[in-house]
Amino acid sequence: MKTMHLKRLTVTLLAGFVGGALAVLTFLLVASQRDDIQFYKQQQVPAQLASYSDNGSSIGPDFRVAAQTSIHAVVHIKTQYQQKSIYYDDFFGVDPFFNFFRNAPNGNYPLVAAGSGVIVSGNGYIVTNNHVVQNANTIEVTLNDKRTYPATVIGTDALTDLAVIKIEESGLPYLTYGNSDNVQVGEWVLAVGNPFNLTSTVTAGIVSAKARDIQILGDVSAVESFIQTDAAVNPGNSGGALVNTVGELIGVNAAIASNTGSYTGYSFAIPSNLVSKVVGDLIEFGEVQRAYMGISFVDIDGKFAKDKGLDEIRGVYVESIIEKGSAEKAGIQTGDIILKVDDIVTNSKSELKEIIARHRPGDKVLVTISRNGKQQVMDVELQNRSGATGIVKTDPSDVASLLGATLEPAPKEEMSALGISHGLKITKLEQGKLWSAGIKEGFIIMYIDQKPVKTMEDITNILKNKTGGILIEGVYTNGMRAYYGFGI
């Protein structure tokens, strides 16, 4: 039995050996007839850090080209003021813009402040915020390569918070304008400026919203249609660039929303399409050529739509029409809903104001309205503040034209009944600063910037060489006292 088991084991081992030998011989025979079979020696792959890339590629958006393009075209602006006390705006109290780009200590001595600017032409024109250079005694510009130049003010516009200054140099690097209408919410952007005097600082974020009206300019005629971003912007960034990922200027940084005075997640930039128009006007005419439709309008929300019996919540509602204004001449009526201007959808007051602000008097726009549920397209020729279509050149001595009003001394019997001793009464009101501020005919102006008004000469003297916010105090003939503010 034992012998039989041993034999079986021997036969099994022999068969296995023979089978293995045959398999090896078969493989060698086949391999000898083919030249495409190779033997590989396993090699250990070199270890490397997960974040390392030796070919220069990056994960996510690449801002390097945009940053290099923009930092050379963004300048550092230093200004000097004769400070009498902590800075108070004529209308706001403490000026929110002033505190955004500088700290204002008490004391009667020169104050040095700082902001940013963007070179927009090779021959030295620079755009910045009005609040960066307003009332400055001296302006100094430092380029990214540390060259320093004195600058002069070419023009300012309080209603858009923009200003143009110039240095005497040529061949400068500059940014080209992008189309801010094409900017999309969620798009990556860079903010470039000089926060806290940290020159040539670049921060990144996305566009958080468009056409934001944050009511910081304090004038009903002001154009606030900001691009909102979450790119970090701090004091000193005012007037700096907001650029897209290819380095085009799509906005000028102007403000932050903050309870602390420093960045807390929200920053706001003036859109480039508005910037380019204002800059062009200031360079060519020294002042903005502002166009008017001759209407007052309101936003449409759910409650407003319900009250007015509107089927849709869209567009801007025409609340009133100025007699002989552009809208009336085109056939627009009170109660119409403006849906588009030149194929640009207008779903808010801020959007409509920005679109109109990008035009000059005499320009024609196609306005799509909804009336009784039916759409119509109106051909509207925009006017200037005088109701004409020509270019306006302001004469500082022509106060009546600037204000858009006919003023006469208030009748003695009216002053006696109201218990006042002085004032000028508005007997006729047209498009102009007073109308834009919401003042009605019959209002008696008693004070401008807290200075008494008795004659037209008083107004001329008060407003002569004045820029920035204006505060008007007075009374209506029914005894209601009122306060109005606007900018010039």
Image: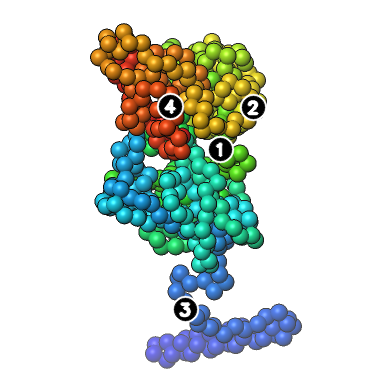
Asked if marks 3 and 4 touch (Cβ < 8 Å), the reply is no
Q: Residue at x 60, y 24 (%)?
A: 383
The amino acid sitting under disc 3 is Ala
- Locate residue 444 relative to residue 326 in the image: left or right: left
Disc with the residue nearer the chain's start (1 vs 2): 1
Pointer 3 local density, CA inside 10 Å: few below 14, some 14–19, many at least 20:
few
Report if the CB atoms under discs 2 and 4 are less than 8 Å apart: no
Tag shown at residue 239: none
Separation (CA) of disc 1 from disc 3:
64 Å
Is residue 454 found left or right of 313 in the rendered image?
Answer: left
At label 1, the amino acid type is Glu
Considering the numbered disc 4 on the image, is that residue within a helix, a strand or a loop? helix
**The residue tagged with tag 2: helix, strand or loop?**
loop
Give the labeled residue for mark 2.
390
Mark 2 crowdedness (10 Å alpha carbons): few <14, some 14-19, many ≥20:
some
Q: Earlier in the sequence, mark 2 or mark 4?
A: 2
Q: State the residue at coordinates (52%, 55%).
A: 151
**In the rendered image, which residue does mark 4 sit on?**
457
Q: Earlier in the sequence, mark 3 or mark 4?
A: 3
Closer to the observer: label 3 or label 2?
2
Q: SS at mark 1?
A: loop
Q: Nearer the viewer, residue 370 or 117?
A: 117
State how far apart marks 3 and 4 are (Cα). Answer: 84 Å
Q: Residue 52 location in percent, x, y? A: 48, 72
The residue where tag 1 is placed is 287
Rendering coords of residue 205 (x, y %): 45, 52
**CA gap, disc 1 and disc 4:** 24 Å
**Badge 3 is on which residue?**
47
Q: Are marks 1 and 4 in contact (CB under 8 Å)?
A: no
